[in-house]
Image (cartoon, rainbow, N blue to C red):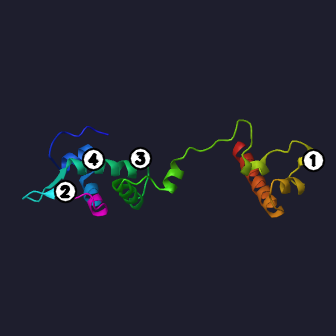
Amino acid sequence: MPQIPNKLYFRIGEVSDLVGVKPYVLRYWESEFPDIKPSKSKSGQRLYKRRDVELLLRIKELLYEERFTINGARKRLKEFSRGDAPSAAVKEEAAPVEREPEGEVPRQLEVFAEPDSEDDEVDDVSAPARRGMDRGSVKAFQKIKKDLEEILSVIRS
């Protein structure tokens, strides 16, 4: 976050430089985010307060770094302004991804794993059934596997 000078008011050009976006982007954000309300001088020049600059920096972070949509950023700002904790969906997004232990095939990809023995062939209906998969799913995954293997062979050649 850039250092904000200790001033009461900032003109749009200064804010544009501080935030790192063009002035027209700031004017657009004013129309999309109701909390941004710069006052205007007698000559019509926008005058932003420090709070506005901090909010604009947060909006830029949400939109450009965290890749929120305008609506998503608006909702996120509303949550923080109310002092709410992020919603369950946001917490879920931010939760670290659980990784499979080294050497183990992720459960959803078991059907693509090479069989350990002749008894565990994918064509054997009982093996996938033990994994909770129906015959139609097995056939669909076999087709996908075959298509991917063909693509891989084309890429390698």
Label 3: state its secondary structure. helix
Mark 4 and mark 2: span between their CA atoms?
13 Å
Q: Give x and y (percent) for residue 30.
A: 26, 60
The residue under the point 28% across, 62% down is 34
Mark sitting earlier along the chain (2/1): 2
**Quadrant into which the C terminus falls:** top right
Mark 2 to mark 3 CA distance (whole Å)? 24 Å
User: Distance of mark 3 from mark 4, alpha carbons?
Assistant: 16 Å
Give the residue type at disc 3: Glu
* For the residues bearing labels 3 and 1, Cβ distance under 8 angstroms: no
In the displayed structure, 64 sits above or below 5; it is below
| Residue, far right | 119
Dot 1 corresponds to which residue? 119
Q: Assess whether mark 3 and mark 2 are in contact (beta carbons under 8 angstroms).
A: no
* Label 4 secondary element: helix
Say left or right for 74 vs 90: left
- The kind of residue on which mark 2 rests is Pro
Report crowding for label 4: few under 14, some 14 to 19, many 20 or more residues within 10 A (C-alpha): some
Number of marks in picture: 4
Residue 54's label in the rendered image is 4
Range of residues picked out in magenta: 29-37
Q: At which x and y percent is residue 68?
A: 43, 55
The amino acid type of the residue labelled 4 equals: Glu
> Marks 3 and 1, how far apart in space?
50 Å
Q: Secondary structure at mark 2?
A: loop
Apparent side of residue 126 relative to residue 12 in the rendered image (left or right): right
Foreground tag (4 vs 1)? 4
